[in-house]
Image: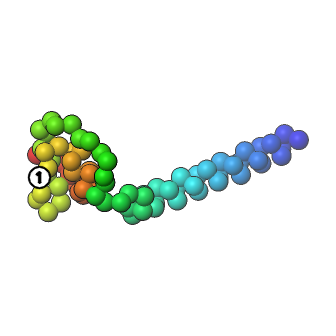
């Protein structure tokens, strides 16, 4: 009986791990986010970031709203 319980746990763990990897892969390809993201209110704090293509945004939130890539604080 305990063997069946252990096998069930292993199967469930494998399903969860597979789901996490699937979600991560889809999210990494931008599958869950429509850009630009609407409905997000960013704080009006000036902490500039520079992103791919040399575009500068006033803060990281504003950059993420337009799905800017490879942003670093400027």
Front in this rendered view, residue 51 or 45? 45
Estimate the x, y position of residue 63 in percent, counting from the top left: 21, 51
Side (left or right) of 13 relative to 57: right
**Residue 30 appears in the picture as rendered:** yes
Side (left or right) of 39 relative to 54: right
The residue at the point 24 percent across, 44 percent down is 61
Front in this rendered view, residue 9 or 28? 28
Residue 64 position (above or below residue 34): above
Q: Quadrant of the N terminus?
A: top right
The residue at the point 58 percent across, 52 percent down is 17
Quadrant of the rendered structure where residue 5 is?
top right
**Residue 28 appears in the picture as rendered:** no
Residue of label 1: 56
Q: Residues within 10 Å of mark 1 (few under 14, many from 20)?
A: some
Q: Secondary structure at mark 1?
A: strand
Side (left or right) of 49 relative to 23: left
Q: Among all residues in the image, which is located at the extreme front? A: 39
Side (left or right) of 4 relative to 23: right
Estimate the x, y position of residue 10 in percent, counting from the top left: 71, 48
Q: Among all residues in the image, which is located at the extreme right? A: 1
The residue at the point 24 percent across, 56 percent down is 66
Estimate the x, y position of residue 57 in percent, counting from the top left: 14, 49
Front in this rendered view, residue 70 or 34? 34
The residue at the point 36 percent across, 60 percent down is 34
Estimate the x, y position of residue 55 in percent, counting from the top left: 12, 57
């Amino acid at each position: 009986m305990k063997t069946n319980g252990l096998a069930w746990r292993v199967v469930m763990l494998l399903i969860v791990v597979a789901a996490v990897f699937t979600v991560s892969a889809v999210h990494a390809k931008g599958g869950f986010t429509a850009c630009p993201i609407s409905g997000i209110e960013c704080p009006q704090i000036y902490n500039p970031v520079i992103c791919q293509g040399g575009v500068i945004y006033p803060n990281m939130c504003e950059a993420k709203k337009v799905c800017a890539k490879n942003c670093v604080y400027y």
